[in-house]
Image: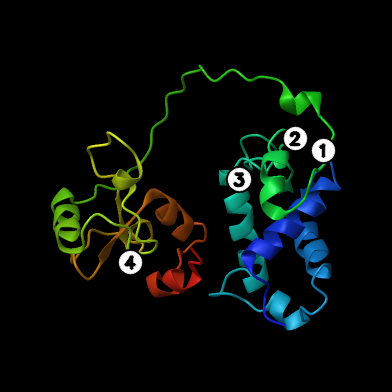
Amino acid sequence: MAIPHRELIKKELIKLLASRSEGMKTSNIYVELAKVFPGLTLSECTERYRNSASKWANTVQFVRADLVDQGIIFRPGNDIPNGIWKLIPHGINNYSRVIGIKSIDVPANPEVIKTYTEEERVERISKIIERSSKAREICLSHYGYACMCCNTAVKDKYRNIQCHIIEVHHIKEISLIQNVYSVNPIDDLVPLCPNCHRAIHTVRPCYEINEFFDMYIG
């Protein structure tokens, strides 16, 4: 069988994590989740994707990113150790209505639910890449301010928002280029909404633009 639809994987992933209150390691997730779909073949689970992780692993990671953004799974590295997948106790039941589960009982963990201080100020020295504001301007003038993937114009979704909320994606991933290079605002850039822009960068290197458009399910 082909790799299942992400929404189906999402539903089964939530059920799996709900049964493991202590969380699960990434490698165990891939194996245990694959068992839920007995039609998956070994080759489908291990076939390499763009010389990186397997297609199965990439699909599951994409599902995880969705659930992190929706407040269903803890963000790795910030809330829990890297490599551990764990449900947020107070977030799951909000999502349960969507996936058709009446209720999932996730044991409360006082060490996780306690409040955290976020007022600490830390000074960091970082390297940033300067983008061309002129190239962005020309790109948006040509394509407009709607997302090229989901066709959403974020400004139109809210009352009293006057500015356009749109990002410009570099088709050739700029962070992987070591030297200064010339960018064609029409051929090398596309407008994406913040959600789609984040989603296209959930793998490294990022998804190719046409491949990403084909992945969109609305």
State left or right for residue 119 relative to residue 47.
left
Sequence order check: which comes first, mark 4 or mark 3? Answer: 3
Say whether disc 2 or disc 3 marks the residue closer to the N-terminus: 3
Task: Locate residue 79: give its quadrant.
Answer: top right
Element on which disc 2 rests: loop
Q: Earlier in the sequence, mark 2 or mark 4?
A: 2
Dot 2 alpha-carbon crowd within 10 angstroms: few under 14, some 14 to 19, many 20 or more:
many
Residue 172 disc label: 4
Residue 102 x/y as whole percent: 79, 46
Residue 68 — which label?
A: 3
How far is the residue under mark 2 from the one under mark 1?
A: 5 Å
For residue 134, side relative to residue 97 (left or right):
left
Q: Image height check: is 47 above or below 53?
A: below
- Which mark is on residue 17? none
Instruction: Kindly state the secondary structure of the residue where label 3 is placed.
Output: helix
Picture disc at residue 89: 2
Question: Label 3: how many residues lie within 10 Å, few (<14), some (14-19) or many (20+)?
Answer: some
Measure how far apart labels 4 and 1 are at the Cα level: 43 Å
Q: Quick check: marks 2 and 1 in contact, CB under 8 Å?
A: yes
Mark 3 is on which residue type?
Val
Q: Give the answer, above or below, for where 103 lies relative to 143.
A: above
Of residues 180 and 135, the one drawn nearer to the viewer in this rendering? 135
Which amino acid, mark 1? Val
Q: Which residue is mark 1?
A: 106
Residue type marked 2: Pro
